[in-house]
Image (spheres, helix red, strand yellow):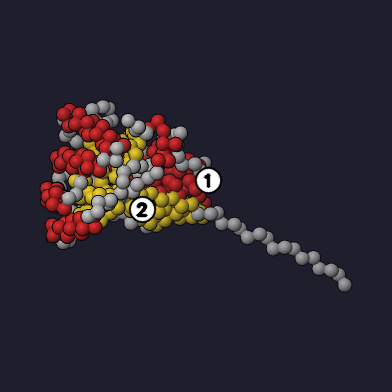
């Protein structure tokens, strides 16, 4: 009897692993304006616990890269840019999930882009250090500094880190949304009527907030954020600013902060205050009474605090403010 020869079945085609990236949002900025120097537009971030998660699942190169939801066109453009730079044919699905409201001045677009860069980098085996992400994002739009796990001074129009300021004790932000939305690109294209006196004041405020973050002085941070919000009224006025300042005074807040290019305004509260729970509740009630309905809303956010790991990063240590 003739023996039969059996061949092992071919190995199944192994799917390439997905890449995942995350990035946090901000509640506006602690400070934003223009310094008395070339390309002096800058901001100081206020990271909060709102997140974007991007997932890239490789697929047939012939199908190209697609995105879900389809409106995330900037993330799609960045994904294709990274694929082109990789020098290989890339296809797959980019999925962007976010709990950061869009068009409100909370860095939703920046978080989408940073998370996308990290997801593509992980999926394709590409290193994505901050300098590379900055270079890529500069080809898309003005960008917040959410790629750095710290409070940073950031040149958002040039997409360039100015300084790592550090971290602060936890705060709450009781915020309102005045309604509507703002396109970041359009806002940054609009002329900014800053005088030289304004620009010198922004330089002083930047020095003060750098000192306040270094010494973890929340009261000083609140005063500087309030001053920045007031100076921004000539660019994007907020009807709620004065009522919010009054509420902050009444409930014992640190001051107010705003989305300088958005629709949000918020009251800063020290989360370590023994009366914290009472102050948050009182602020939220008072903010609710301000609103007239429609797209307007009240929300409470928690700021993020970070370890001192950045000071040990040799690529970033030269940006760290120590005095």
2 or 1: tag closer to the N-terminus: 2
Quarter holding residue 66: bottom left
Estimate the x, y position of residue 320 in percent, counting from the top left.
37, 34
- Point out the residue furthest to the front here: 274
Residue at 41% x, 36% y: name it: 311
Estimate the x, y position of residue 278 in percent, counting from the top left.
21, 58
Mark 1, residue position:
125
SS state under label 1: loop
- Image quarter hosting the C terminus: top left
Question: Is 143 on the left or on the right of 19, as rendered?
Answer: left
Reply above or below: 196 against 23.
above
- Point out the residue furthest to the bottom here: 1
Which label number is shown at residue 179? none
SS state under label 2: strand
- Local crowd at mark 2 within 10 Å, few (<14), some, or many (≥20)? some
Mark 2, residue position:
51
Total marks shown come to: 2
Q: Is residue 263 visible?
A: no
Residue at 46% x, 48% y: name it: 120
Residue at 28% x, 51% y: name it: 272
Question: Depth check: 30 or 218 in front?
Answer: 218
Distance from label 2 to label 1 (Cα)?
23 Å
Question: Depth check: 152 or 309 in front?
Answer: 309
Question: Is 56 on the left or on the right of 72, as rendered?
Answer: right
Q: Is residue 56 visible?
A: yes
Question: Is 139 on the left or on the right of 176, as rendered?
Answer: right
- Image quarter hosting the N terminus: bottom right
């Amino acid at each position: 009897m003739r023996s039969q020869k059996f061949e092992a079945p071919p190995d199944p085609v192994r799917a390439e692993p997905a890449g995942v990236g995350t990035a946090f949002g901000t509640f506006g900025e602690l400070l934003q304006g223009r310094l008395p120097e070339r390309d002096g537009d800058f901001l100081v971030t206020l990271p909060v616990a709102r997140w974007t998660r991007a997932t890239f699942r490789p697929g047939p190169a012939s199908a190209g890269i697609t995105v879900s939801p389809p409106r995330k066109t900037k993330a799609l453009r960045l994904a294709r840019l990274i694929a082109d730079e990789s020098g290989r044919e890339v296809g797959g699905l980019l999925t962007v999930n976010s709990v950061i409201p869009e068009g409100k001045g909370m860095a939703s677009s920046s978080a989408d882009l940073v998370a996308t860069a990290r997801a593509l980098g992980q999926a394709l085996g590409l290193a994505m250090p901050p300098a590379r992400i900055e270079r890529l994002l500069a080809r898309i739009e003005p960008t917040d500094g959410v790629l750095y796990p710290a409070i940073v001074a950031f040149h958002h129009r040039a997409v360039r880190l100015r300084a790592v300021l550090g971290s602060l004790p936890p705060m709450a932000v009781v915020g309102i949304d005045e309604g509507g939305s703002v396109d970041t690109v359009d806002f940054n294209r609009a002329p900014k009527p800053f005088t030289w006196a304004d620009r010198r004041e922004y330089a002083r405020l930047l020095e003060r907030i750098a000192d306040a973050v270094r010494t973890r002085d929340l009261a000083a941070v609140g005063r500087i954020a309030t001053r920045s919000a007031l100076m921004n009224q000539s660019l994007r006025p907020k009807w709620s600013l004065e009522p919010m300042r009054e509420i902050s005074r009444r409930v014992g807040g640190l001051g107010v902060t705003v989305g300088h290019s958005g629709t949000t305004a918020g009251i800063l509260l020290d989360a370590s205050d023994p009366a914290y729970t009472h102050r948050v509740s009182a602020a939220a009630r008072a903010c609710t009474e301000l609103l007239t309905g429609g797209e307007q809303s009240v929300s409470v956010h928690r700021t993020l605090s970070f370890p001192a790991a950045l000071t040990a990063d040799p690529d970033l240590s030269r940006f760290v403010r120590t005095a």
